[in-house]
DNA sequence: CCTACCGATCGGTAGG
DNA sequence: CCTACCGATCGGTAGG
């Protein structure tokens, strides 16, 4: 259960979306040499430029002209690869959501069968907060919240598959640990929520109200995670 | 220390701002009958309309024309009462911030000297969550987060005077309760943060990602508050 | 990749 | 002379 390398996380998103097949499905102009590599290159450049600008300036604050300019392509090329601005936005966000979903599953994977449960939960809290507190992740979370009025289904799907997925996985883990007598958690879902907000709450909240503020140092984050995990372990310690 | 009547809370904000003196300070045209009551009436109508629309559609999503139309006045009247759209927005938010600040102080007032500390903290949690979970309060919080990029100083001031004020007051209360041996909270600020996120975290988070979603019932909120308070009390129970 | 253009809408201000 | 208010329209910019 190795922790993923932090900074590569966002790159995976960009590359995945950038490498996706273009939207044209009818009679693609294939030759024997396969699809035109310039198509994928242009699409990847648009996706990367759009990701950068959406995360920095929001949906409304980003114009398609800016995306085209930063990608080094014509505005027409943007619309050749994505139906419209809304589709471009939702495809980028859903690509990241899939990455976050995989992270959630890996994060909790070893917990139900851990031998040193307090140690495993402290370790999980440290990895969890370190992953969530990365500037790109905080910006994405903030972006989705900002656009939840315009894209309610997208926000709901992100919530269900990213933070909600962690809650779901932790609920199952805590249920087993309660049965094993390792935790006193008769309501495992509530315990999972309490864990999440004890470990992540302060950091996520601060980032929403002060988006341009400094990132906490790894040492600060480690301390916040440890104190949150300790409070959780004391509250849910078996009798 | 009675809990404020919920729905009247927002009205206080609107009336306070609406009744404020107009901006003109040089040589007001007073007669023996006092200032023109139409001035205050127009200003109040603009403030109320702007509050409604900003909370519903955000800053960018609200035009001055819409504000004027909903208030039933000419657009020129908006500019006669507020220097520009940004000033209108910040004055409204700061008016509410002052109300929230007073609420924070009253909320925690009796805690440091409480005799039944667990009972007082459970009671505080119920009043705290009930106040914060009101739709108007959740919408205001969301609005400030949405505009934290455009109005960073405003977001920082709101955070400091509203949720931060609760943390500050609780920190002092927990420090005294720790000294009295009623809580085991050697780091009272961290304890105050843990209390806040245990009691409020899930409700605030859900409202951000699903702003059009249903409000939890008072019974649900009471249960969430009680379980959060119980987890806090177990985690910080003196030895 | 640039310029041009569309239908629409914005915040702010003119005259009366 | 003042404040308050109106109908009309300004220059500039957005997505497409």
Image: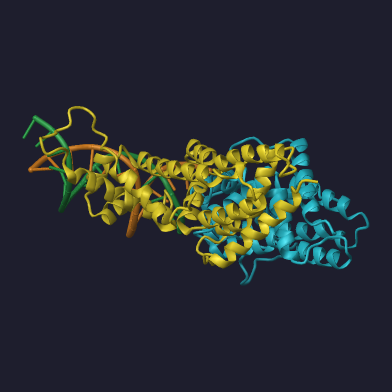
Chain colours: A cyan, B yellow, C orange, D green
Residue at 34% x, 50% y is B50
Q: Residue furthest front?
A: B115
* Residue A189 position in % (x across, y down): 72, 65
- Residue A52 in view in this figure: no
* Residue B84 position in % (x across, y down): 32, 39
Which quadrant: the N terminus of chain A?
Answer: bottom right
Q: Is B135 left, or right, of B79 in this rendering?
A: right
In the image, B97 versus A29, the foreground residue is B97
Residue B118 higher or lower than B90, as above or below: below
Which quadrant: the C terminus of chain A?
Answer: bottom right
Quarter location, residue A136? top right
Quarter location, residue A56? top right
Residue B188 higher or lower than A23, as above or below: above
Q: Residue furthest bottom?
A: A26
Q: Is B143 left, or right, of A223 in this rendering?
A: left
Residue at 88% x, 55% y is A117
Q: Is A160 left, or right, of A69 in this rendering?
A: right
Q: Residue furthest top?
A: B26
In the image, B103 versus B21, the foreground residue is B103
């Amino acid at each position: 259960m190795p922790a993923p390398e932090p900074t590569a996380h966002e790159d995976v998103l960009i590359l995945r979306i950038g490498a996706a097949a273009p939207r044209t499905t009818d009679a693609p102009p294939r030759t024997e040499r396969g699809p035109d590599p310039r198509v994928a290159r242009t699409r990847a450049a648009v996706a990367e430029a759009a990701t950068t600008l959406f995360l920095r300036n929001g949906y409304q604050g980003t114009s398609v002209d800016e995306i085209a300019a930063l990608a080094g392509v014509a505005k027409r090329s943007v619309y050749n690869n994505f139906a419209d601005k809304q589709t471009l936005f939702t495809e980028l966000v859903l690509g990241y959501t899939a990455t976050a979903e995989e992270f959630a599953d890996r994060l909790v994977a070893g917990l139900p069968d851990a031998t040193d449960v307090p140690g495993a939960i402290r370790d999980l809290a440290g990895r969890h907060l370190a992953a969530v507190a990365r500037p790109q992740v905080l910006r994405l979370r903030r972006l989705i919240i900002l656009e939840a009025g315009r894209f309610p289904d997208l926000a709901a799907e992100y919530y269900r598959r990213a933070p909600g997925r962690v809650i779901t996985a932790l609920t199952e883990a805590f249920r087993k640990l309660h049965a094993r007598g390792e935790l006193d958690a008769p309501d495992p879902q509530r315990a999972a929520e309490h864990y999440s907000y004890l470990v992540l709450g302060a950091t996520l909240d601060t980032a929403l109200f002060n988006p341009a503020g400094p990132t906490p140092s790894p040492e600060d984050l480690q301390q916040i995670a440890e104190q949150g995990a300790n409070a959780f372990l004391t509250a849910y310690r078996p009798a």
